[in-house]
Image: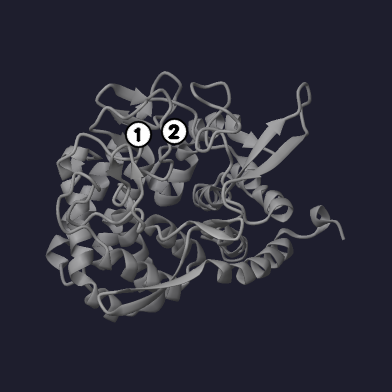
């Protein structure tokens, strides 16, 4: 039977079964503070580990799977490696989640804590874990670390914006050129002119503050609950003002000391997964969808629209297509009633069937044709959060968000 004529849930069930067998290839174990944690490396290429343990990848994969065992392991790993001091070489700050467990030297610094949003994802995952498991024991065990993550989020809020600034750790820059998941570079910037606010991270901060408010009871900080909710609402109010590009009527990618960093980016669709329907004005929602049509391909949404500064269909973060991001876009599309965007995001199923659970893929449109083109896998042969994509999409189609 041709895959195209088979129902989407059945195709996703087949992909999910294939993914289960490949999770084994990424399994690893480490011992921290006397506890052995069973985790997964981020990716392999040519049968060898290319990317090891990443806080972001573990948390996002657990969120996608909605699996309490995976959540618990990721929460413990991030909590036990949470920043405790200020280190300008690694980017470490108290309460800041680890980016990369293995030290990688770039530009004279280490990438270890070069991620702004890991602590935010930790809080979101912890709230999901409590909702699904009703287990307070893990939260009580990691209470000091979770409170440190909440304090980290508070410390980075300035006038309603979640601000990233290497001066917080005593440095003037980071090893990486951007410190959210699209960490290779930003368009039209060699490095950000710090301080910077990433629009997607702003949305994640909103979700994290709300998660922290939910966690106030098991963490015994009920006296902070009302304030955490208020901080989240203030952050929402700045999302579509300070971080909106009036010239192209589309969210900015970021705003730094030089000003807005504009562009038609998948960040705008991706961030909807972290926002409530009432957070997004209908006019802005319609404009986000209209602008994102420039990102559509036969295999999902590109990370960045063609024809813009520094864009290439073969660029890692400024033109390629990432399977895991399609799952977040699909989630946001359902929550915010964007059925056409959901249809495009689900096209990643075609790519997964043809290419496997690769890190990312490129799509090159055939010259002069309205449809047709070539796709090509890139990066890791097997990527952790790509393996989680079929399960995430199947759950959305069968159970909803």
Q: How is the image coloured?
A: one colour
> Residue 86 location in percent, x, y?
15, 50
Question: Residue at coordinates 78% horizontally, 34% vertically from top-left?
Answer: 372
The single residue placed furthest to the right in the displayed view is 1
| Side of 182 where 289 appears, left or right | right
Q: CA separation, marks 1 and 2?
A: 8 Å
Total marks shown come to 2
Pick whichever, 382 or 235, lies toward us. 382
> Residue 10 location in percent, x, y?
73, 65
Are discs 1 and 2 less than 8 Å apart at CB?
yes
Residue 241 visible in rendering? no
Question: Residue at coordinates 72% horizontally, 55% vertically from top-left?
Answer: 353
> Residue 282 location in percent, x, y?
45, 37
The residue where tag 1 is placed is: 240
Q: Is residue 288 above or below residue 66?
A: above
Question: In the rendering, which numbered label is found on residue 284?
Answer: 2
Q: Residues within 10 Å of mark 2 (few under 14, many from 20)?
A: some
Q: Is residue 18 above or below residue 69?
A: above
The single residue placed furthest to the left in the displayed view is 223
Sequence order check: which comes first, mark 1 or mark 2?
1
> Residue 204 location in percent, x, y?
35, 49
């Amino acid at each position: 039977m041709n895959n195209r004529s088979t129902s989407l849930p059945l195709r996703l069930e087949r992909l999910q079964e294939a993914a289960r067998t490949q999770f084994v290839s990424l399994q690893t174990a480490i011992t921290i503070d006397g506890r052995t944690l069973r985790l997964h490396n981020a990716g392999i290429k040519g049968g060898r580990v290319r990317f090891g343990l990443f806080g972001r990848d573990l948390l996002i994969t657990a969120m996608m799977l909605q699996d309490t065992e995976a959540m618990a392991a990721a929460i413990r790993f991030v909590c036990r490696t949470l920043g405790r001091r200020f280190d300008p070489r690694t980017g470490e700050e108290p309460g800041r989640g680890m980016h990369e467990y293995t030290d990688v030297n770039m530009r004279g610094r280490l990438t270890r804590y070069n991620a702004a949003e890991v602590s935010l994802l930790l809080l979101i995952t912890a709230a999901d874990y409590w909702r699904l498991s009703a287990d307070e024991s893990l939260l009580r065990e990691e209470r000091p670390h979770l409170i440190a993550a909440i304090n980290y989020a508070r410390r980075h809020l300035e006038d309603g914006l979640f601000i990233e600034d290497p001066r917080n750790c005593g440095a003037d820059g980071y090893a990486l050129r951007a410190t959210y998941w699209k960490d290779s570079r930003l368009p039209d910037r060699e490095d950000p002119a710090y301080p910077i606010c990433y629009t997607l991270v702003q949305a994640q901060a909103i979700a994290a503050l709300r998660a922290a408010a939910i966690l106030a009871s098991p963490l015994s900080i009920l006296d902070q609950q009302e304030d955490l909710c208020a901080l989240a609402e203030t952050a929402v109010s700045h999302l579509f003002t300070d971080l909106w590009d009036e010239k192209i009527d589309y969210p900015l990618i970021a705003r730094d000391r030089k000003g807005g960093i504009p562009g038609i980016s998948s960040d705008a669709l991706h961030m909807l997964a972290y926002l409530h329907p009432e957070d997004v004005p209908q006019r802005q929602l319609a404009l986000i969808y209209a602008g994102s049509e420039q990102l559509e391909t036969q295999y999902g949404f590109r990370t960045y629209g063609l024809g813009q500064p520094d864009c290439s269909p073969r660029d890692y973060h400024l033109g390629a297509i990432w399977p895991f991001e399609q799952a977040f876009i699909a989630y946001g599309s359902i929550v915010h009633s964007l059925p056409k965007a959901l249809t495009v995001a689900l096209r990643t199923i075609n790519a997964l069937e043809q290419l496997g659970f690769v890190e990312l893929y490129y799509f090159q449109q055939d010259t002069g044709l309205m449809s047709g083109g070539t796709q090509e896998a890139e990066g890791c042969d097997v990527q952790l959060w790509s393996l989680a994509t079929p399960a995430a999409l199947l759950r959305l189609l069968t159970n909803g968000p």
